[in-house]
């Protein structure tokens, strides 16, 4: 009996140790009051279904704490098949009625995902004329953001449309919306945009829907991943882009292959799917959540937050 009690006590101590390790992997959200703070989320519009609502609620709490200035949406904005017009009720049921916290009423900068291409992508562009916070002036666009109100310290973000970069999309269910798009013109525009070498530009970021690299097993070398990488990798390398942000895979990832660019996948704002790891994986997490970016002149802080408010990963890029 005595040996049994000793064994039980030992197991209890081991369990406490394991729990403490799990807790050690999480931390409190860091605030950077003098930074440009924004949220990055993706693959989200499900009329509030799955885990969209709890993630949205947590986004509101985090945005309040860090004083977020805007939200980046990495595509697949409306499931299952996009929207048909700027008056589509999904704008209300999947967007306006879900992200209701006051801290989320500032500007949203979306890009288009493959699900958005199943109907009318230009309807999301047109919605910018109706909504105060939806800012998609074209299928691809760019904007510079000042850090802490200082025009001499800026972040350049190019928001691109990766769908026309995938040859397979010119046939089948996406063809109607993708045919007529000039992928060469978009890449020329991207090259020109990223060629801005003003000393005020401290960070260059590109946002698209499809990943160049992913640890999600079914998409590591899928046709869309390969096509996006083949089309964009040389451009990102040429212009020394600091970070590429995307969705498509319903998980949270940080990958760092050779070169300057860090790759972040934030595509689990309402659904999560299984994931593996790659040698270049710094984070590979199957969980519901989003990312927080905070940019100063010489640091880019990244925090990964799950739907229950845990900061499960943080890193920083330095100049």
Image (cartoon, rainbow, N blue to C red):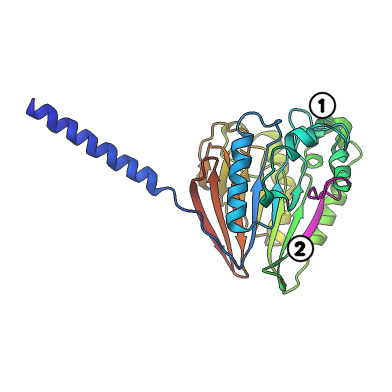
Query: Would you identify the image quadrant in which residue 289 lies?
Result: top right
Q: Where is residue 232 in the image (x, y as percent from the top left)?
A: 73, 50
Mark closest to the chain's N terminus, 2 or 1:
2
Q: What stretch is highlighted in magenta?
A: 130-144
Location of residue 175 in the rendering, given as x and y in whole percent from the top left corner? 85, 31
Q: In which quarter of the image is residue 120?
A: top right
Whole-percent x, y for residue 306 in the image: 53, 42
Secondary structure under tag 2 reads: strand
State the residue lying farthest toward the left: 2
Residue 264 appears left or right of 118: left
Q: How far apart are the two marked residues, 2 and 1, measured between alpha carbons?
A: 34 Å
Q: Dot 1: few (<14), some (14–19), or many (≥20) neighbours within 10 Å?
A: some
Circle 1 sits on which residue?
A: 173
- At mark 1, the secondary structure is helix
Magenta: predominant secondary structure element? loop
Closer to us: 24 or 113: 24
Residue at the (71%, 30%) spot, across then down: 47
Task: Find disc 2 in the rendering and name its residue.
Answer: 144
Count neighbours of disc 2 (C-alpha within 10 A) and say few if under 14, some if 14 to 19, many if 20 or more.
Answer: some
């Amino acid at each position: 009996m005595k040996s049994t009690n000793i064994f039980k006590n030992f197991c209890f101590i081991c369990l406490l140790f394991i729990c403490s390790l799990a807790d050690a992997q999480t931390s409190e959200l860091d605030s950077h009051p003098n930074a440009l703070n924004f949220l990055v989320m993706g693959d989200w519009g499900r009329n509030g279904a799955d885990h969209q609502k709890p993630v949205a609620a947590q986004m509101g709490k985090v945005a309040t704490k860090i004083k977020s200035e805007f939200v980046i949406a990495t595509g697949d904005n409306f499931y299952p098949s996009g929207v048909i017009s700027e008056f589509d009720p999904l704008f209300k049921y999947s967007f306006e009625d879900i992200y209701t916290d006051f801290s989320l009423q500032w500007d949203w900068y979306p890009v288009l995902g493959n699900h958005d291409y199943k109907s009318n992508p230009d309807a999301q562009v047109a919605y910018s004329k109706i909504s105060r916070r939806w800012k998609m002036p074209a299928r691809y666009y760019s904007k510079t953001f000042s850090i802490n109100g200082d025009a001499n310290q800026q972040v350049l973000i190019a928001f691109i449309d990766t769908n026309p970069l995938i040859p397979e999309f010119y046939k089948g269910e996406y063809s109607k919306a993708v045919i007529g798009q000039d992928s060469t013109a978009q890449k020329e525009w991207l090259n020109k945009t990223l060629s801005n070498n003003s000393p005020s530009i401290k960070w260059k970021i590109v946002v698209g829907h499809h990943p160049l690299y992913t640890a999600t097993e079914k998409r590591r070398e899928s046709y869309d991943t390969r096509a996006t990488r083949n089309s964009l990798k040389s451009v990102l390398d040429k212009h020394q882009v600091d970070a590429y942000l995307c969705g498509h895979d319903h998980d949270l990832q940080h990958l760092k292959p050779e070169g300057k660019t860090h790759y972040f996948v934030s595509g689990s704002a309402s659904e999560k799917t299984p994931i593996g790891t790659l040698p270049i994986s710094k984070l590979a997490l199957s969980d519901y959540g989003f990312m927080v970016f905070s940019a100063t002149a010489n640091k880019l802080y990244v925090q990964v937050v799950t739907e229950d408010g845990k900061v499960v990963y943080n890193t920083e890029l330095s100049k």
